[in-house]
């Protein structure tokens, strides 16, 4: 009888411990979700275009708008046809800033999309995108062709006039 009572007590204790363990795990999972939501990264950036180069400058912050140092920023530029024209990864500085610059391909002319995502251990990844319009640098090939045509037209004009 004592053995039977001890076995019953042991089974109830195991059941109680199992329920307590499940409750603790559930509470920890709930708390981790709250931490992730508080550690969401946000990236903002601007795009400028000068002399055949596209420049991207931005900042990575946390949910409190505090700058995040050492975040990895992935930058990808896509042309209107859906082709990747630039891909790079940079890090944010002490005050959460990042910059990147790439030569706009000569074949690119028009509107494209830049995708930026930021990640860092202990934070939930943040991403954003923006459209940009770029006109590639006037290439030397185009310039040589233009000059050849101009010379041919000038010679043709002289021949007709004279």
Image (cartoon, grey):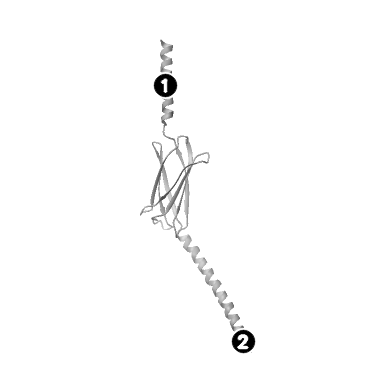
Location of residue 145 (image quadrant): top left
Q: Is mark 2 on a helix, strand or loop?
A: helix
**Given contact means CB atoms under 8 Å apart, are the residues at marks 2 and 1 in contact?**
no
Compared to residue 139, the image places residue 32 above or below, namely: below
Q: In which quarter of the image is the N terminus?
A: bottom right
Residue at the image point whose x is 42% and y is 47% from the top: 45
- The image shows residue 94 at horizontal and vertical percentages of 35, 54
Viewed as shown, does residue 82 lie left or right of 57?
A: right
The image quarter containing residue 150 is top left
Residue in the foreground of this view, choosing between 112 and 4: 4
* The disc label shown at residue 131, or none: none
Relative image position of residue 93 (x, y in whole percent) = 37, 52
Cα separation, mark 2 vs mark 1, equals 108 Å
From the top left corner, tell me how far across and down residue 53 is, in percent.
40, 39
Q: Residue 46, position in %: x, y?
A: 41, 45
Q: Which mark is residue 5?
A: 2
Numbered label attached to residue 150 = 1
Q: Which element carries disc 1, helix, strand or loop? A: helix
- The C terminus lies in quadrant: top left
Which tag, 2 or 1, sits closer to the chain's start?
Answer: 2
At a point 43% along the width and 51% down the height, the residue shown is 73
Bin the neighbour count of mark 2 within 10 Å (Cα to Cα): few under 14, some 14-19, many 20 and up. Answer: few
Q: Which one is nearer the viewer's eye here, 63 or 113?
A: 113
| Mark 1: few/some/many CA within 10 Å (<14, 14-19, 20+) | few
Q: Nearer the viewer, residue 30 or 153?
A: 153
Residue ID at (41%, 26%): 144
């Amino acid at each position: 009888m004592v053995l039977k009572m001890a076995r019953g007590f042991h089974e109830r204790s195991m059941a109680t411990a199992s329920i307590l363990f499940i409750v603790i795990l559930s509470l920890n999972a709930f708390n981790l979700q709250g931490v992730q939501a508080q550690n969401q990264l946000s990236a903002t950036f601007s795009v400028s275009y000068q002399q055949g180069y596209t420049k991207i400058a931005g900042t990575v912050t946390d949910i409190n708008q505090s700058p995040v140092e050492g975040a990895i920023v992935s930058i990808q530029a896509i042309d209107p046809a859906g082709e990747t024209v630039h891909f790079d990864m940079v890090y944010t500085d002490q005050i959460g800033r990042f910059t990147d610059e790439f030569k706009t391909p000569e074949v690119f002319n028009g509107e494209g999309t830049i995708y930026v995502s930021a990640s860092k251990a202990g934070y939930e990844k943040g991403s954003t995108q923006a459209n940009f319009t770029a006109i590639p640098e006037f290439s030397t090939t185009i310039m040589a062709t233009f000059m050849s045509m101009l010379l041919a037209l000038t010679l043709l004009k002289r021949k007709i006039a004279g």
